[in-house]
Image: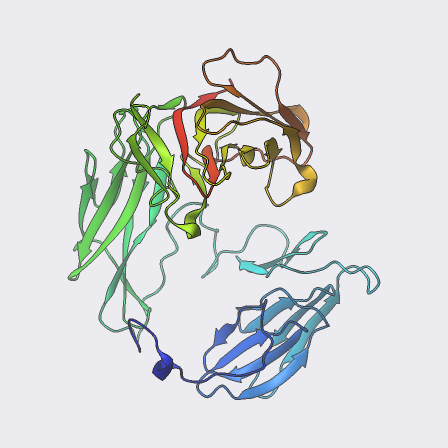
Amino acid sequence: TAKGTVGKEQVRWRVVGWQGGFSSPVLDGDRVYQVDNGANLAAFDANTGKRLWLFNLGTIQKASPVLADGKLYVGSENGRFWILRPGPDKPVVLDEDQLGTEQTPEAIIASPAVADGRVYLATMDNLYCIGPKGARRAAAGGGKTPARGTATAKANPAASAGPPTHLQVVPAEVLVKPGDSVTFHARLFDAQGRFVREAVEDAAWGLEGMRGAVNAGHFTADLQAVPRTAQVTVKASGLGGVARVRVIPPLPWEYGFDEAEAVPPHWVNATGKFAVRAAETGTGKVLVKLADNAFTKRARVFMGPTDASDYTVEADVLSKEQRRQMGDAGLVAQRYQFVIFGNHQRAELNPWQPETARAVTAPYAWKPNTWYRMKLRVENLPGGRVKAMGKAWPAGEPEPQGWLVERTDPIPNTHGSAGIYSDAPVEVFFDNLKVVSNR
């Protein structure tokens, strides 16, 4: 029941020496379950912290247990997958499987997922679906499964639900094109998180930040071909709720920052990390990756829909230098990233930065306090492959014909949002940003 800062006096109990470093705990009423790093599943009394029982799953553990339908689903790095029915004194083993062999197991690092009466389990080698074959089972009550993306899963009012204390707007955030329509729902919950009812007749809807209206929860974006944001508001039973709407037109997009006062509000992960201000050269305004907070030194900003594909991103970039340290600047397209590194004086193209084996690199001399033009083009090819290409050159000079780095990816990212990237202890600048379709 504590609120605000949680101090030592609010700690109900603690267990010293428990090596639960990788796996997250799961709460089941008055019992807490967690697996330690040695694959020992333990049950603790949620009120006192007393350990109730211990059950060994293997020798190495990363995945967290998942509780669904009164059962625990959990796998170990030894490739063993368990379905357990936990009890007050011990768990009952309902099923145990060795995936792969004991000599070459399929390591289970990720937690299972449960949806529509099925269990989905990813190993390092395969993805398994456990459950009935054929059409997906409806989430509740039988019948047809609701269409993907609809808000028809209405919980039945709980007989013991108290007065509403929280109003939830569903969906909470949407991204649409001009002219698209969305239906929002206002759902009321009590202080214990139990569903009370959906507010319909007594819901007062509003729209803030753009022209238009929300009528009985129905919103339609106008046809204005500029990116914009708004908040859908609703009041019912003395409570209020909001949802965020981002309206983004189809390509092309161009961002010159001379007329901007702040970072575009429809961008994701830019607030507090980037700012718009006058260029030190006096040639207008630019976008600045700030260097005032070590915790936000690295930033990857996304500016469009996640289903975008076959497009090119371009921008001018400049890095300051301080104590012989420069920054890194990059472009993102379709989940591929093209970066030039100031300290390492190289260019890199990769589908995922931690996966260095799939990265393509080339030496590149990037001078501090000098503008360069960067370009990243990603193409979906016949046969399911993707080709990504990147180049950089001094701004104002002719664009080179060839690409500095390129890769045809047999394990492709077929879609993804456009964006920019920077990792820098000093300020890095962006300008003349452009995203255009390849078609």
Identify the residue at horizontal 68%, vertical 27% (top origin).
383
Q: What colour scheme governs how the chains and residues are painted in the rendered image of this protein?
A: rainbow
Say if 127 sits above or below 336 in the image: below
Image quadrant in which the N terminus is located: bottom left
Q: Is residue 101 visible?
A: yes
Which of the 4 image quadrants contains residue 408? Answer: top right
Instruction: Choose between 88 and 375: the one closer to the eye.
Output: 375
Instruction: Choose between 390 and 327: the one closer to the eye.
Output: 327
Q: Is residue 177 visible?
A: no
Identify the residue at horizontal 24%, vertical 45% (top origin).
232
Identify the residue at horizontal 75%, vertical 61% (top origin).
99
Position of 51 with respect to 303 (left or right) is right
Which of the 4 image quadrants contains residue 85? Answer: bottom right
Residue 169, x across and y down, in percent? 29, 53
Say if 91 sits above or below 331 in the image: below
Residue 342, x across and y down, in percent? 53, 34
Residue 65, x across and y down, in percent? 58, 68
Residue 434, x across and y down, in percent? 42, 23
Instruction: Choose between 110 and 401: the one closer to the eye.
Output: 401
Q: Residue furthest right?
A: 103
Position of 264 with respect to 20 (left or right) is left
Numbered label tally: 0
Which of the 4 image quadrants contains residue 12? Answer: bottom left
